[in-house]
Image: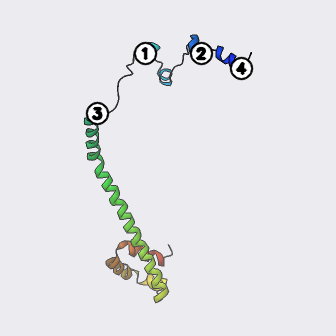
Amino acid sequence: MPITTLASETEPLISQGATSVTKSDIQQQFNLSDDFMHSINRTISFTLTKEQQEKIDQLLNKRISGRIIGIDDVLELIVIAGAGYAAGHWAASEAHKRFGLSAPSYKSNRWWWRAGISAVAGIPAAIGFDDYFYGI
């Protein structure tokens, strides 16, 4: 018997009347009966209406906007302070290399240096300058 003849004589499993009984994961997990699963209206749409979407957007805008601005401000301050610290560290290395400011000389007058640098360039720059001469 040729293969083509054999293929034409076979019927699909569905047409032979076999039914497959499989339970969904949700049905097994919550131990739901077949009657309950068949009673569920599967034509219900769970999409949000335009009014519901607008209400959610309004709630999110009201609740989250302050946090986003707060996080943004904190990140900007971190960047500004980091740049000031790096500038102070760089200025200390230049003062050491070009002008011969030594660590003992700086440490003996550190409060004057800190006050002057803080007034001119800010506290982060003064801390960066200080950390350079203390080897941090």
Q: Amino acid at mark 3?
A: Thr
Residue holding disc 4: 3
Which of the two residues, 20 or 27, is positioned nearer the viewer here? 20
Q: Position of residue 54 (x, y in %)?
A: 26, 40
| Left or right: 61 in relation to 25 | left
Residue holding disc 1: 38
Q: Amino acid at mark 4?
A: Ile
Q: Quadrant of residue 87?
A: bottom left
Q: Position of residue 35 (x, y in %)?
A: 44, 12
How many neighbours does mark 2 have within 10 angstroms: few (below 14), some (14-19), or many (20 or more)? few
Earlier-in-chain disc, 4 versus 1: 4
Q: Position of residue 52 (x, y in %)?
A: 27, 35
Q: Amino acid at mark 2?
A: Leu
Q: Secondary structure at mark 1?
A: helix
| Residue 91 shows in the view | yes
Earlier-in-chain disc, 4 versus 2: 4
Q: Residue at x 59, y 11 (%)?
A: 16
Q: Amino acid at mark 1?
A: His
Earlier-in-chain disc, 4 versus 3: 4
| Numbered marks: total | 4
Instruction: Please state which of the two labelled residues, at mark 4 or mark 2, is closer to the viewer.
Output: 4
Residue holding disc 2: 13
The reply to whether callout 4 and callout 1 are in contact (CB within 8 Å) is no
What is the C-alpha distance between the residues marked 2 and 1? 23 Å
What is the C-alpha distance between the residues marked 4 and 2? 19 Å
